[in-house]
Image (cartoon, rainbow, N blue to C red):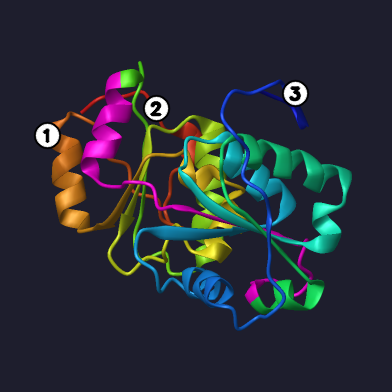
């Protein structure tokens, strides 16, 4: 069970998996982690950093495996993550600090990275979200090619309670390592429609009587003066 950042470790019925120690950065499993990091393994995502790893563990994302530096694994926080992952039978790989640097996507790594299944995306995912919400608010990004910006928008969108986010063709991958760090895990919780054609997205919203509002830096009206609950 999760309560804030304190995890209660009760007796469990299914067996825990023991950590796997790997010393070589050329080990096939470590090589594969780097491929996931670089977006070369379809259907999988690379998540790095204490806080974002914790957020993804709390989500409904299917976890595949976790890589930890020996130093991180021996810390109190690392121990809690290890116990949670062991309880859920998620393999944990222990490596030296030098080997972890070979898989890290940051300059100052925190010694923990997670491999998970890439969430499903598409209009159907947002449709399901609409059915659960009393109000509908969808953000659409056109050719947002900076992954940090995409992640920041997803993080803000989740805080604002949006129903879903549409990313047009030409936008950055919402599930790249950089986007996930910027999104602090919102990427795996907010319903997303990727690679959408803007014309198709607008048609889709109008068919569902969702009011379409365009944002432009040169616009004459402030976003604060718009009725966000208006229906077309």
| Residue identifier under label 2 | 227
Query: Quick one: SS at disc 1?
Result: helix
Question: Where does the magenta region start and end?
Answer: 103-131
Q: Residues within 10 Å of mark 3 (few under 14, many from 20)?
A: few
Q: Looking at this view, name the residue that lies furthest to the top.
A: 134
Q: CA distance from mark 2 to mark 3?
A: 44 Å
Picture coordinates of residue 203 (x, y %)? 13, 44
Residue 8, labelled with which disc?
Answer: 3
Taking the spot 67% from the left edge, 42% from the top edge, the residue there is 54
Label 3 or label 1, whichever comes before in sequence order: 3
Query: Quick one: SS at disc 3?
Result: loop
Relative side of 132 to 78, left or right: left
Q: Quadrant of the N terminus?
A: top right
Taking the spot 80% from the left edge, 72% from the top edge, the residue there is 97
Q: How many marks?
A: 3
**As drawn, 102 above or below 201:** below
Picture coordinates of residue 52 (x, y %)? 65, 49
| Residue identifier under label 1 | 207
Q: Nearer the viewer, residue 88 or 216?
A: 88
Question: Residue 13's image quarter?
Answer: top right
Q: CA distance from mark 2 to mark 1?
A: 20 Å
Q: CA distance from mark 3 to mark 1?
A: 47 Å
Q: Residues within 10 Å of mark 2 (few under 14, many from 20)?
A: few
Taking the spot 29% from the left edge, 36% from the top edge, the residue there is 126
> Comparing marks 2 and 3, which lies closer to the viewer?
3
Relative side of 51 to 185, left or right: right
């Amino acid at each position: 069970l999760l309560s804030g950042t304190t995890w209660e470790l009760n007796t469990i019925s299914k067996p825990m998996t023991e950590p796997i120690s790997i010393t070589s950065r050329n080990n096939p499993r470590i090589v594969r982690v780097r491929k996931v990091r670089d977006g070369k393994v379809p259907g999988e995502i690379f998540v790095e950093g204490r806080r974002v790893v914790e957020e993804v563990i709390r989500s409904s994302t299917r976890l595949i495996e976790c890589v930890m530096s020996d130093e991180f694994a021996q810390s109190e926080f690392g121990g809690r993550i290890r116990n949670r992952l062991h309880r859920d039978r998620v393999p944990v790989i222990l490596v030296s600090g030098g080997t972890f640097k070979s898989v890290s996507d940051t300059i100052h790594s925190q010694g923990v990275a997670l491999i998970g299944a890439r969430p499903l995306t598409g209009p159907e995912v947002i449709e399901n979200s609409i059915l659960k919400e009393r109000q509908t608010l969808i953000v659409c990004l056109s050719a947002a090619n900076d992954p940090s910006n995409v992640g920041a928008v997803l993080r803000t969108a989740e805080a604002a309670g949006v129903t879903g986010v549409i990313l047009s063709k030409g936008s950055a991958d919402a599930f790249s390592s950089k986007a996930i760090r910027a999104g602090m895990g919102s990427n795996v919780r907010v319903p997303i429609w990727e690679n959408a054609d803007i014309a198709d997205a607008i048609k889709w919203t109008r068919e569902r009587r969702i009011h379409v509002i365009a944002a432009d830096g040169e616009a004459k009206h402030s976003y604060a003066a718009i009725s966000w609950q208006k229906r077309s």
